[in-house]
Amino acid sequence: MFDIDRWREIFQTISKNKLRTILSGFTIAFAILLFTILFGIGNGLKHTFEREFAGDSMYSIYIWTGRTTKPYKGLQAGRRIQLKNDDYKYLIDKFKSNISTISPRIQRNTNATYQGKKNNYTMRAVYPGYQKLESAEMMSGRFINMLDLKKRSKVVAIGRLVEKDLFGQLSAIGKEINMNGISYQVIGVFSDPGGDNDERYIYAPFTTVQQLYGNTDHVDSFGITYNPALNVDQAIKFGHNMEAALKEKHSIHPRDQNAIRVRNYAEGNRDASMMMFVLNIIILFIGIGTLIAGVIGISNIMIYIVKERTKEIGIRKALGARPRTIIAMIMMESIFITAISGYIGLMVGTGVLGLIGNKLERYFILNPSVETYVVVGATIVLVLAGTIAGYVPAKRASSIKPIEALRDD
């Protein structure tokens, strides 16, 4: 219950002991300030790792080829391995249960032109499932669909920055762009969390490009998303199994590391998860260490404060103050100073992170920040520590007889 007289007493005590109040408040504010900055920097490192995986689905596997480095089954080393359309069917038939989406890919550099504006981009010929691989989000229009593949339509979905480069403030939907002498209609514009580079891609139907550029059944690479139900170890094994199957199909030595190449994001996710775990442990220790230092500081200050006020407590008891009243007053003062100081430390800490945030990217620290609930939780811990630190000596002091308290040196 709010007691205005008690609060007036607390403010009078604080105003008469400014140095003591400032020192105790500084200890708490500095603890929260340090906690906020260190925790924010730790989160900045976590954000950097998360950004590395933002451009593609975390369940992705990419397969492409090179030249053989070992002779096998009477075949010479140095053969160029070429993926083909029947490899797409082979992978689906053999690994259907573990494949979520799969898309063959052909990639070419292209010069795109619209009404005198032109620029160089990367064109990718893909299946509709490739949108999931790149985590592309449609801003307007649509992505490539199966009907486009069936009809071999001359249509494209372009990145946000391609639209900006060629069309300025105009919408690109429905307009025609010329790529290497062939006109394509823009059916969609997408954004990509991977950043500017990924928003300068142009996607066309796989069958259209395969027919226009050589009329062959050649495939540059495959992009696959695996079943999310697979755990990391199962996903890594799945990638190895596909690699082994393709090596067997193309008569490649099992230990040839160059002919069939597989990039499995499950391995990167495992490494990133381990790094994130280590970072979380470091951040946890930093947080706990900072809070412990703050708790010790508060405890020492509160013991000193109560000791200093022993004679005052004796006078209060001589005038009829009850022990619980004395304890409540000291604890309320402790909680008030801790809460206000903690809030100041929080505000200063978040302000510092805001000022230095952009300057830390060169050190691979992206958007250093700390969730409000984390710092509020840390402040509550310090408030509780201040409460306990104030209660124990206050309880002891309130039990001293007035005559003994007045004699205290």
Image (tube, grey):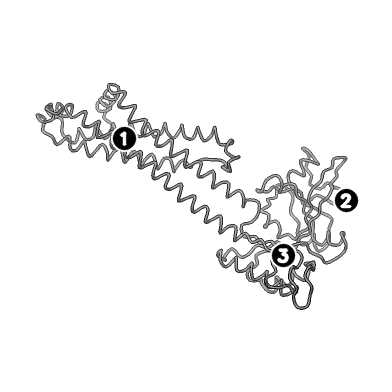
Identify residue type, mark 2: Asn
Q: Which residue is mark 3?
A: 258
Q: Earlier in the sequence, mark 2 or mark 3?
A: 2
Q: Position of residue 120 (x, y in %)?
A: 81, 46
Q: Residue furthest bottom?
A: 73
Q: Which residue is mark 1?
A: 335
Say whether marks 1 and 2 touch (CB < 8 Å).
no
In the displayed structure, 341 sits above or below 229; it is: above
Q: CA distance from mark 1 to mark 3?
A: 66 Å
Alpha-carbon neighbours of circle 1 within 10 Å: few (<14), some, or many (≥20)?
many
Alpha-carbon neighbours of circle 2 within 10 Å: few (<14), some, or many (≥20)?
few
Left or right: 188 as drawn, with respect to 320 = right
Q: Earlier in the sequence, mark 1 or mark 2?
A: 2
Q: Position of residue 406 (x, y in %)?
A: 12, 27
Occupied quadrant, residue 396: top left
Identify residue type, mark 1: Ile
Q: Which residue is mark 2?
A: 180
Occupied quadrant, residue 208: bottom right
Residue at image location 52% in from the left, 56% down from the top: 274
Q: CA distance from mark 1 to mark 2?
A: 72 Å
Q: Position of residue 346 (x, y in %)?
A: 44, 35
Q: CA distance from mark 2 to mark 3?
A: 32 Å
Alpha-carbon neighbours of circle 3 within 10 Å: few (<14), some, or many (≥20)?
some
Q: Position of residue 199 (x, y in %)?
A: 72, 47
In the displayed structure, 327 sits above or below 178; it is: above
> In this view of the protein, which residue sits in the foreground, 243 or 207?
243
Q: Quadrant of the N terminus?
A: top left
Left or right: 6 as drawn, with respect to 244 = left
* Element assignment for label 1: helix
